[in-house]
């Protein structure tokens, strides 16, 4: 148990110390008051603020109060090791290598853009309890009527021209073995799999169709690339109370609102900016690839309870599109 706790604490601390190292770039000559200095590494100072910054970005809730001094000391030791490595990198002129300079600049851009997005998110109004209750009422499949599904799937290319036959077999209640054997007899390549998923791990647009199925029933899904035969092998009721759901739904709606605000902001920024595509990119400027806004929040339903582990069998993208919810 102690090793697990140490791991949960150490990983965020390591990541945060890297951020401290990046933020320290360019501030070599800045001296700190003696009361703020935690240690000196040759001529460089490590401040108490740096330790607090790392601590603030780690999972402090998992740190028992009696262990706080030890954790702070561990952070300091990591910062000392980091400073020693930085000194050596500068002495050996590693910081002048083009790939290192590009990495530093990329990290700087990422930190600044993320900070801007966080500022946009912080400016959005927090979802109210009434808004959360409305969402819960509109999505009973995720809450009052929530179920855990054991789903079997057969996936084949849309080019196989088997849609009509498969639809008839699904309507007739044919088993997945029967369908697989028919596909084999027609020399149609397919893949199969099964997985256990709670409602929140199924895409919202697909959930009403899956929720409507009774155990043993199936349905046919089509898109431009694939045909999917889905069968509900079994399910169990697992409702979530409103009291448990409300704070998670508020978090979900808040993240969703922040993502929408960020997308709107970037659309406006692009409209006001002069962006000129050059060279090979100029040719495709008329139809640029769709890029996600940095730190975009996925529009996925909030998680309620830990989901059962999926069976160790391949499952198609129809299931894998679902996510466990907000982190």
Image (spheres, rainbow, N blue to C red):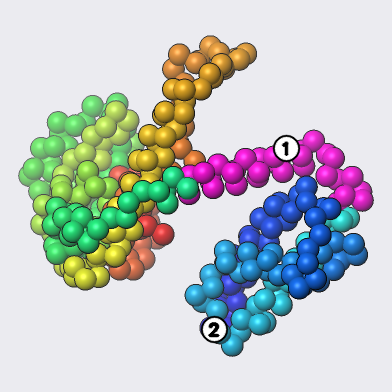
Q: Residues within 10 Å of mark 1 (few under 14, many from 20)?
A: few
Q: Secondary structure at mark 1?
A: helix
Lateral position of residue 193 relative to residue 217, left or right: right
Question: Which residue is found at the position 32% from the left and 55% from the top?
Answer: 126
Classify the position of the C terminus by image quarter: bottom left
Q: Secondary structure at mark 2?
A: loop
* Magenta run includes residue 53: no
- Find the magenta span and give its range: 89-118
Quadrant assignment, res 224: top left
Q: Nearer the viewer, residue 183 or 327?
A: 327
Residue 241 location, x and y as percent? 19, 70
Kindly indicate whether the residue at mark 2 contacts the one at mark 1 (C-beta within 8 angstroms). Answer: no
Q: Which residue is mark 2?
A: 64
* Magenta run includes residue 96: yes
Q: Nearer the viewer, residue 124 or 60?
A: 124
Question: Which residue is found at the position 22% from the left and 43% from the top?
Answer: 205
Mark sitting earlier along the chain (1/2): 2
Q: Which residue is mark 1?
A: 102
Quadrant assignment, res 127: bottom left
Residue at the far left in the pictured view: 172
Residue 276 location, x and y as percent? 56, 16
Question: Disc 1 to disc 2, how far (Cα)?
Answer: 39 Å
Q: Is residue 302 above or below residue 96?
A: below
Residue 168 location, x and y as percent? 10, 37
Q: Is residue 92 above or below residue 105?
A: below
Q: Most prominent secondary structure in the magenta stretch?
A: helix
């Amino acid at each position: 148990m102690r090793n697990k706790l140490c791991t949960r604490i150490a990983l965020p601390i390591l990541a945060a110390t890297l951020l401290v190292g990046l933020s320290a770039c360019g501030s070599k000559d800045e001296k700190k008051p003696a009361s703020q200095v935690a240690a000196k590494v040759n001529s460089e100072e490590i401040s108490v603020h740096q330790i607090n910054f790392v601590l603030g970005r780690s999972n402090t809730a998992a740190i028992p109060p009696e262990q706080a001094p030890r954790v702070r000391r561990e952070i300091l030791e990591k910062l000392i090791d980091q400073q020693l490595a930085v000194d050596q990198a500068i002495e050996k002129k590693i910081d002048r290598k083009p790939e290192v300079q590009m990495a530093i600049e990329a990290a700087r851009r990422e930190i600044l853009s993320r900070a801007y997005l966080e500022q946009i998110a912080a400016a959005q109004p927090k979802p109210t309890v009434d808004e959360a209750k409305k969402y819960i009422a509109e999505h009973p499949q995720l809450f009052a009527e929530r179920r855990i599904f054991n789903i079997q799937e057969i996936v084949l290319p849309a080019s196989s021209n088997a849609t009509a036959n498969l639809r008839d077999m699904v309507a007739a209640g044919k088993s997945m073995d029967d369908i697989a054997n028919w596909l084999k007899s027609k020399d149609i390549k397919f893949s199969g799999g099964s997985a256990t998923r709670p409602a929140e791990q199924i895409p919202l647009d697909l959930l009403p169709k899956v929720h409507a199925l009774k155990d043993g029933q199936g349905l046919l899904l089509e898109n431009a690339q694939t045909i999917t035969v889905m069968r509900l092998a079994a399910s169990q009721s697992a409702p979530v109370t409103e009291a448990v759901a409300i704070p998670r739904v508020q978090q979900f709606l808040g993240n969703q609102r922040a993502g929408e605000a960020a997308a709107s902001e970037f659309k406006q920024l692009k409209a006001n900016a002069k962006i000129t595509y050059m060279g090979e990119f100029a040719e495709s400027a008329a139809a640029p690839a769709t890029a996600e806004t940095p730190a975009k929040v996925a529009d996925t339903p909030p998680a309620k309870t830990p989901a059962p582990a999926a069976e160790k069998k391949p499952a198609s993208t129809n299931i894998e599109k679902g996510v466990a919810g907000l982190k």
